[in-house]
Amino acid sequence: MADTAVHTADHGAHGAHVTSTGLSNNKLAMWMFLGSECLLFGGLISTYMLYRGRHGSGPGPNQIFDIPLTSVSSFVLLMSSLTMVLAVNSAKRHDDRGTNLWLVATGLLGTVFIGGQVYEFTTFYNEGLGFTTSLFGSSFYTLTGFHGVHVTVGIVMLLSLVGIINRSRIPGDKAEVVEMIGLYWHFVDVVWVVIFTLVYLIPA
Amino acid sequence: MSTTAEHTHDEAAHDHDGHEAHDHDHPTDGYFVKTAIILAIVTALETTTYWWEGWFGEDVARFATPSLLIMMAIKFFMILLVFMHLKFDHKLFSLMFYIGLVLAIGVYMVALFTFKFFAS
């Protein structure tokens, strides 16, 4: 039975599984997942676009957004993509120390971004924009909140990965595991690129 | 950002079925740093559009939205192709992602047209 299976547990020189496509099934699944995430964020972004002018007597986007602050947050998230890709390269060189260093740096930059988002939400709330204040408020908090949750999940994955690498608990190709978490992290950054432009910079 | 000589670090990238494994061919750290610098510059340019009306007047400011959309697309594809390695990886990975992306853009553009978003 073992010799007939295309997807065997047979590991190659780099710990990769033999598959019918010759590609990593895990990586293929990750790309499919990211493709499906486009539909999730597409729905949230288009809902926001429809409702951004519906703020009634509450504060609207042009009165409430702090563009310099959000620009700094965007820059921080962008740089976290750089540190993430450097972590992937370190993992491919089998440099565990470098991998851990860049993963921690990515997690810290992500934490700074989340800190900025918490500050922004708190400020907006104090200025009178609650979740149920208006359709604008609901769609804005839902969209950016979902993104924030994705970043938070990414930070947890990054820090967990550091712990797992330190304990040498990754069977097979370590670089591929780092790369897959990297793909998720870059996707979160790509989504923010779209949100930053469509939500914050293009006037309502 | 474009020199192919920088695409080094081959790891004997051949799989067990005779297919060439493109996903083992990846660029150097310097290549990624250059990409990040370009992304940072584009982000700075994006941010300046917020003040275009005050600096240059309404005639120039009306080009802010199309400029922003172009810069957004540049950043989007630079991250996708370089940081996420789609440029260097097997085309099947690209296909998996682009199916979702094209479907999302198509469905939600129809939704926005249905709600007359572009008419307002």
Image (tube, coloured by chain):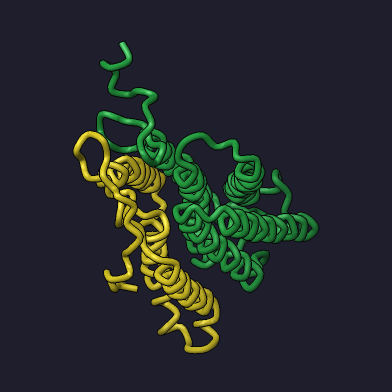
Residue at the image point whose x is 52% and y is 67% from the top = A201
Colour chosen for chain B: yellow
Q: In the current view of this chain or complex, which residue is farthest to the left?
A: B18
Q: In the current view of this chain or complex, which residue is farthest to the front?
A: A13
- Left or right? Give the position of A73 relative to A27: right
- Left or right? Give the position of A153 relative to B98: right
Which chain gets the green colouring?
A
Residue at the image point whose x is 29% and y is 73% from the top = B3
Residue A35 image offset from top left, x and y in percent: 39, 41
Image quadrant in which you'd find residue B27: bottom left
Which quadrant of the figure contains the C terminus of chain B?
bottom left
Compare residues A68 and A190 and report the one nearer the observer: A190
Residue A27 image offset from top left, x and y in percent: 39, 39
Residue A179 image offset from top left, x and y in percent: 46, 48
Compare residues A131 and A164 and report the one nearer the observer: A164
Q: In the current view of this chain or complex, which residue is farthest to the right?
A: A126
Residue A189 vertical position relative to residue A40 in the rendered view, above or below: below
